[in-house]
Image (spheres, grey):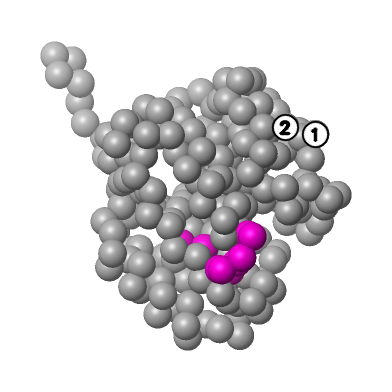
């Protein structure tokens, strides 16, 4: 399988509609990036959960998923499930977030996510981050909206298992949900691994990209 490789990543932006979206969608990728790039700067924006247990969980989780990185997290208080009704505020917050950082890479939900909060955020992100590579992560849930991604980040089995351990450790408020378990998370990462000939993988929907072809020196 032919790979496309990014240059050095020093700063990223990660966006989620809810506390735990980012970790579920790309937790293993965060672990990999943070370990590969000491001093990585992570800017995070989450639309809902401010001021309660969910925000506390998110702060602890992102710290654990980004070892050695500098994490700047802002959690808003948009009501869960009501993001479309707060379009104007979210658009303004996203604009302010964009002006506060200059990421090399942006991660957000993908546009075809069936959850209205995820989908609205996915639609707004490219209106602000016009010059960055945007990768849409997937969240396994009740809706049958699992995408057909074409971009895969291969993972060793130990990283996939560490992601699941950290999810369980840092989001105890979600433990009673029928979709929040090791088998679900590992099942999806194993499936994506099969699709890219790896033990496990996280997969992304590519928003838009350009590619440059150069001749090899001495060829």
Judge whether residue 31 is colored magenta.
no
The correct choice, above or below, for 90 with respect to 7 in the image is below
Judge whether residue 50 is colored magenta.
yes
Task: Tell whether label 2 touches label 1 (CB within 8 Å).
Answer: yes
Write down the quadrant of residue 128 in the picture.
bottom left
The correct choice, above or below, for 40 with respect to 172 in the image is above
From mark 1 to mark 2, how far is it between C-alphas? 5 Å
> What residue is disc 2 on?
186
Residue at the image point whose x is 45% and y is 25% from the top: 2
The answer to whether 156 appears left or right of 210 in the picture is right
Frontmost residue, 189 versus 151: 189
Q: Which mark is residue 56?
A: none
State whether residue 158 appears in this view. Answer: yes
Write down the quadrant of residue 67 in the picture.
top left
- Image location of residue 198, percent across then percent down: 60, 21
> What residue is disc 1 on?
183
Mark 2 secondary-structure assignment: helix
Other-residue count near label 2 (Cα within 10 Å), few / some / many at <14 / 14–19 / ≥20: some
- Which quadrant would the C terminus be assigned to in this image? top left
The correct choice, above or below, for 139 with respect to 123 in the image is above
Q: Main secondary structure of the magenta part?
A: loop
Q: Which residues are magenta?
A: 45-54
Residue at the image point whose x is 31% and y is 31% from the top: 38
Residue at the image point whose x is 51% and y is 52% from the top: 59
The answer to whether 71 appears left or right of 15 in the picture is left
Mark 1 secondary-structure assignment: helix
State whether residue 149 appears in this view. Answer: no
């Amino acid at each position: 399988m032919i790979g496309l490789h990014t240059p050095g990543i020093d700063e990223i932006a990660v966006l989620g509609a809810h506390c735990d979206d980012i970790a579920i969608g790309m937790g293993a990728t965060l672990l990999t990036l943070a370990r590969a790039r000491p001093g990585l700067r992570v800017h995070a924006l989450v639309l809902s959960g401010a001021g309660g247990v969910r925000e506390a969980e998110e702060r602890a989780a992102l710290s654990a998923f980004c070892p050695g990185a500098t994490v700047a997290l802002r959690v808003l208080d948009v009501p869960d499930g009501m993001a479309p009704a707060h379009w104007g505020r979210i658009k303004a917050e996203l604009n302010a977030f964009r002006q506060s950082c200059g990421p090399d890479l942006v991660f957000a939900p993908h546009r075809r996510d069936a959850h209205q909060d995820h989908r609205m955020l996915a639609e707004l992100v490219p209106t602000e981050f016009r010059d960055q590579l945007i990768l849409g992560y997937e969240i396994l849930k009740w809706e049958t909206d699992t995408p057909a991604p074409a971009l895969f980040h291969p993972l060793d089995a130990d990283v996939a298992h560490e992601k699941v351990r950290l999810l369980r450790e840092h989001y105890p408020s979600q433990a009673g949900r029928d979709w929040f378990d090791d088998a679900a998370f590992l099942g999806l990462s194993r499936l994506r691994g099969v699709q890219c000939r790896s033990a496990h993988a996280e997969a992304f929907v590519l928003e838009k990209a350009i590619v440059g072809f150069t001749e090899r020196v001495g060829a």
